[in-house]
Image: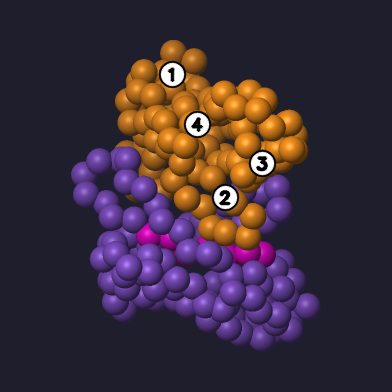
């Protein structure tokens, strides 16, 4: 049981390039999330998904796109990378059924630098 | 809307010192409350949680009590270790937020030997 895995661990992009951050979970969780973490700014939700085929915007969705074709995978796409997207990106998942106390499980993160 | 406020860091302590990290919240209804910990270079992981007023969550020597009268969920540990050096995040989950966690900004803790 690998939990939540993310690739790559590190990436440097040039301004205007595109890339996809991969996220996979093997816990059969229905909810998945993408966050970015900037120093001193906590976590900001980019997009989330409540199940395959269903996605919704979080607090900071501009410049990003997501898809959820399977329960396991939730890739994050950056189009036309900008320096403001330099951050650490975390994918998380949780199993929601009824109560509000379900734990979110996090991946190890992707450190992205846009130059 | 709902919000979480944590004490600002960084917090620097000597080994075996007592730790308190304050967390207060604003929310309607009856949210669940969480503390997550992020060790250097890693993702976040759940440290403890509480789902109703007066519940006490505990794990690895850390404790936090859900106080509805003061809307607080302060994290405490009686004797910190160097290995507790990390960033600690307070968060809440409420029925009106479509299962999205509301996060505090995090408090960095450094424990010196």
Q: Colour of chain B?
A: orange
| Range drawn in magenta | A87-93
- Return the residue nearer the eye: A76 or A16: A76
What chain is tagged by disc 2?
B
- Element assignment for label 2: strand
Taking A2 as reference, is B109 above or below it?
Answer: above
Shown in purple, the chain is A
What chain is tagged by disc 4?
B
Number of the front mark, 1 or 4: 4
Which residue is label 3 attached to? B82
- Return the residue nearer the eye: B69 or B76: B76
Query: Which label's residue is closer to the chain start, 2 or 1?
Result: 2
- C-alpha distance separating marks 1 and 4: 16 Å
Left or right: residue B32 versus residue A57 is left
- C-alpha distance separating marks 4 and 2: 14 Å
Which residue is label 1 attached to? B67
Residue shown at 57% from the left, 59% from the top: B42
- Element assignment for label 4: strand
Which residue is label 2 attached to? B38
Residue shown at 60% from the left, 27% from the top: B79
Q: Can residue A19 be seen from the camera position used here?
A: yes
Number of the front mark, 3 or 2: 3
Is label 1 in contact with label 4 (beta carbons under 8 Å)? Answer: no
Which residue is label 4 attached to? B62
């Amino acid at each position: 049981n690998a939990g939540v895995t993310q690739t790559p661990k590190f990436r440097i992009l040039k301004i205007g390039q595109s890339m996809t951050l991969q996220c996979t979970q093997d816990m059969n969780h229905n909810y998945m999330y993408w966050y970015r973490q900037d120093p001193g700014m906590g976590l900001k939700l980019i997009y989330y998904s409540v199940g395959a085929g269903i996605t919704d915007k979080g607090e900071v969705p501009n410049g990003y796109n997501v898809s959820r074709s399977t329960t396991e995978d939730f890739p994050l796409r950056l189009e036309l990378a900008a320096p403001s997207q330099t951050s650490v990106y975390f994918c998380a998942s949780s199993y929601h059924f009824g109560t509000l106390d379900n734990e979110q499980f996090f991946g190890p993160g992707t450190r992205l630098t846009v130059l | 809307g709902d919000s979480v406020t944590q004490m600002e860091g960084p917090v620097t302590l000597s080994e075996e010192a007592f730790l308190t990290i304050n967390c207060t919240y604003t929310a309607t209804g009856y949210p669940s409350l969480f503390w997550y910990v992020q060790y250097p270079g890693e993702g976040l992981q759940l440290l403890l949680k509480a789902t109703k007023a007066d519940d006490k969550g505990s794990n690895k020597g850390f404790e936090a009590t859900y106080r509805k009268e003061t809307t607080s969920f302060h994290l405490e540990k009686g004797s910190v270790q160097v290995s507790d050096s990390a960033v600690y995040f307070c968060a809440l989950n409420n029925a009106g937020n479509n299962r999205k966690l509301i996060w505090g900004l995090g408090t960095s803790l450094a424990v010196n030997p």
